[in-house]
Amino acid sequence: MRKNTGKIKNAAEARRYRRKLSIRKKINGTADRPRLCVYRSNKNITIQVIDDNAQQTLFSVQTYGKNAVGTGSNKDGAKVVGAAVAEGLKGKSISTAVFDRNGYKYHGVVAAFVDAVRENGIQI
């Protein structure tokens, strides 16, 4: 992974990037236990389910585009996206996953997403 810590001018983005690198050092997704990587913007949420050993994305769910699920980057949208991710994992007969919060604090929308995935039967 290319590290561009010195090039980020915004202090908040630099802190998030530092947290992201620290998290990615410690976790790794496999075919049996993929990595759930969350990206949150002010308007949308994107989740990728990733197998790091094969270096491929198994599937993704987002709140925009042709196959949009839910609306917006709020707690309600995160719950709908979490339920859709859990359905996709069950469809691939995966019962456990590793959560990559991608440098975001475990609070609000990110926490609502993880709670929705757990409520639908996936162990994180």
Image (cartoon, grey):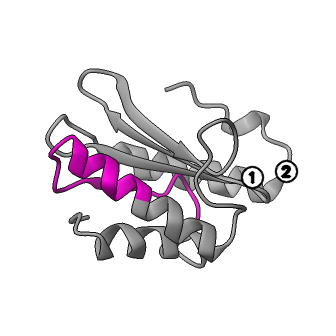
The quadrant in which residue 8 appears is: top right
The residue range painted magenta reads: 84-104
**Is disc 1 in contact with disc 2, using a CB cutoff of under 8 Å?**
yes
In this rendering, position of residue 14 left or right of residue 33: right
Q: Position of residue 43 (x, y in %)?
A: 78, 57
Q: How many marks?
A: 2
Q: Quadrant of the C terminus?
A: bottom left
Counting from the top left corner in percent of width and height, residue 42 is at: 79, 59
Residue drawn at x 32%, y 54% is 87
Q: Amino acid at mark 2?
A: Asn
Looking at the image, which is closer to me, 112 or 61? 61
* Residue 43 appears left or right of 22: right
**Residue assigned mark 1:** 13
Kind of residue sitting beneath label 1: Glu
Residue ID for mark 2: 10
Q: Is residue 88 above or below residue 115?
A: above
Numbered label attached to residue 100: none
119 above or below 20?
Answer: below
Q: Is residue 63 above or below residue 56?
A: below
Tell me the crowding category of disc 2: few under 14, some 14 to 19, or many 20 or more residues within 10 angstroms, Cα based.
Answer: few
> Camera-side residue: 79 or 25?
79
In the figure, is residue 74 to the left or right of 57? right
* Residue placed most toward the observer, 52 or 82: 82
Q: Residue at x 62, y 60 (%)?
A: 70
Which residue is at a point 80% across and 56% down the rendered structure image? 11
- Residue 17 located within the stretch drawn in magenta: no
